[in-house]
Image (tube, grey):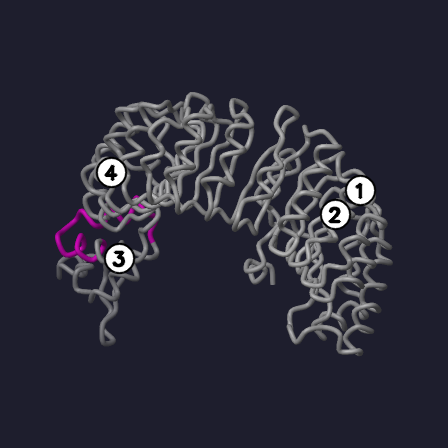
Amino acid sequence: MSSQKGIVLTSAEVISKNVSILILNDDCLLEIFKQLDLVDQVRLATICPRLRNIFQYYCQSHCKVLLKDDLNEMSTREMRRFFEIAGSSLEELVNLPYTDQERNEYVAQVHKNCPNVRRIYFGMTKIKSKCLRKLLVNMKHLTSLHLQKCSLDDNAMQTVSELATLEILKLEGEEDVTGRYLSKLKCLKELTFVECGIQDNYFVEICTSLKGLKKLTLQWCDALTDVAISALPVYCINLETLNISCNQTIEYYAIAQLPKLIDLELSAEMFRTQSFNVLLNTLADFKGEQLECLRIFSPRLIVDDGMRSLSQFKKLKVFGCDCSKYIDVTCLRYICSLQDIEIVSLRYCRSVTNEAVLALLDGCPKLKYVNVMHCDQLTDELVYKTIDLLEIKQNKKSLLSDTNPVLMMVAGTKIRTFVLEDTKYLGALEKGILRLSFVNPFQYPYENLYYTFNVPAVGDLKYFY
C-alpha cells in the first residue's frame, strides 16, 4: 500500500497509477543505493540512464576500492556494466578472480575502463606475463604495486619497469625474479623483496639507480651475498628504513654506515651470536645518536652483551624484541637509560617478569605503549604495582603533559580480565594513568613472528586508544 497526503492506495491502484521509483529525487535515490549490495546496485543502475548516472555519481565517493569477492555474484554482463559505470572511480584493486575465464574478463575490463588506479595488491594467484602487461599498460597513475606468490619472472618485471609513476613495489615469494629491469623504476621510494631470487649484480644496479629510495625490505633472499650488503651504504644514501633478515654466511656490519638510517628491523634467528653482538656494537658506535626505531627478532641471540650495547642508542623511541628467550629484568635495565623511548614490544618473551616490566616503566619517563602479550609470568600484581608506580610519578610531575595513559597489551598473560572491573584500575583509567588491553590487534599470528612489524610506529599510537 502507498500513502500520499493522507490518501491510501492499494497495490492494484499503485500499479494502475504507474507509481515509479523515479518520482523520487536524486538524494532519495542515493540513499537507496547506499542500502544495497554492490551486485544489486549494478542491477538497479542498468534500469535506465537516470539511475545509471546516479550510481556513477555514487561510485565517485563509495567505489574507490574493489575486492575480488565484490564480483562473486555478478554475471559477466553485470561485471562489464559495473566496470563501465564505476571503472573511472576505482583507485585500488585487491586480488584477482581465481578461474582463468573470470580473470581474463577482469583484466580486459580493467584495461578498458580503469585508468585511475593508484594501488594494486594481487596475492596467491598465478598471473601470466602477457596478462600482467595488459592489466598495467594503461595505468598512468599507479603508485603502489604489491605482488605475492603470483609465479612471476623477469619478463613480468619488464612490464613493471615501465610504470613511470610507481613509488612502492613489494614482491613476495617470487623466486624467479632476479631484479633485472627494476633499476628503471626511478621514482621508487619503497622496495620490498621477500623470498625472491634477487641476484647481486641486479641488486647493485637497483641501489645505484634508485637515489630516492627511503625504505627497503630484504627478507630471505638467499642468492644475495656480501656484495649486495656492501653496496647499501655506498649507493642508498637516502635510505631511512631497513628491514633485513640475517644469515650465517654474510657479515652485515656495512648497514651501520647507512648515512640516514633511523628505522632498523633485524630478523636474526639464523645469525651467529658473536656476529650479532658485533653488529649491535657497530650500530651503537655509528648510529647511537641517530637511530629512532629498532625491532629485533632473535629468539636466542639477545643476551646481556647484546642488551648492553642497546643502552647507547640515546635517540631510540621504538624498541621491539619479540620472542626472545633470554630477555629478563637484567637485560631490560640496560634500556632504562633511554629517556626518549615511547614504545616497547616484548611479545612471547617468556622470561619477562613483573619486576622487569616495572623496572622498564620506572626508568623510561616517556613510555606510552608496552606489549607483553604471552609473557606468561606476568600476574595481576603487575597491574596494581604499575598503578602505584605511575601515580607516584604523576604526583612528582615527572610525566609529560600527554593525556594518553600508558597502554599495556596483556593478552596471553596470567593477568585476568576481572581486573578491568576493579575500582583501583577504574580510578587509574579515569585519571589517564593506565589502560589495559586483552585483544590482539595485529595482522600476523604467532607462527609468523618472523615479521616483527607488529610493533607500531610512534605516529600510529593513536589507533590503539
For image coordinates 63% across by 27% down, the residue present is 247
Residue 381 placed where, x, y %?
87, 58
Q: For the image shown, how many numbered marks are present on the structure?
A: 4
Q: Nearer the viewer, mark 2 or mark 3?
A: 2
Give 429 or 369, whichever is nearer the viewer. Answer: 369
Q: Is residue 99 left or right of residue 291?
A: left
Q: Nearer the viewer, mark 4 or mark 3?
A: 4
Residue to which mark 2 is pinned: 309
Question: Of marks 4 and 3, which one's residue comes earlier in the chain?
Answer: 3
Q: Which residues are magenta?
A: 36-55
Residue kind at label 4, given as amino acid type? Val
Instruction: Kindly indicate whether the residue at mark 3 contacts the one at mark 2 (C-beta within 8 angstroms).
Output: no
Secondary structure beneath label 1: helix
Q: Is residue 146 left or right of residue 90?
A: right
Question: Of marks 1 and 3, which one's residue comes earlier in the chain?
Answer: 3
Q: CA distance from mark 2 to mark 3?
A: 57 Å
Q: Is residue 321 above or below residue 361?
A: above
Instruction: Kindly indicate whether the residue at mark 2 contacts the one at mark 1 (C-beta within 8 angstroms).
Output: yes
Residue kind at label 3, given as amino acid type? Tyr
Instruction: Kindly indicate whether the residue at mark 4 contacts the one at mark 1 (C-beta within 8 angstroms).
Output: no
Give 114 or 457, whichever is nearer the viewer. Answer: 457
Q: Is residue 302 left or right of residue 165?
A: right
Residue 447, located in which quarter of the rendered image? top right
Q: Nearer the viewer, mark 2 or mark 4?
A: 2
Residue to which mark 4 is pinned: 110
> Would you say the magenta stretch is mainly helix, strand or loop?
helix
Residue to which mark 1 is pinned: 305
Q: Which mark identifies residue 58?
A: 3
Question: Which quarter shows the N terminus?
Answer: bottom left
Q: How packed is label 2: few (under 14 Cα within 10 Å), some, or many (20 or more)? A: many
Residue kind at label 2, given as amino acid type? Ser
Q: CA distance from mark 2 to mark 4?
A: 53 Å
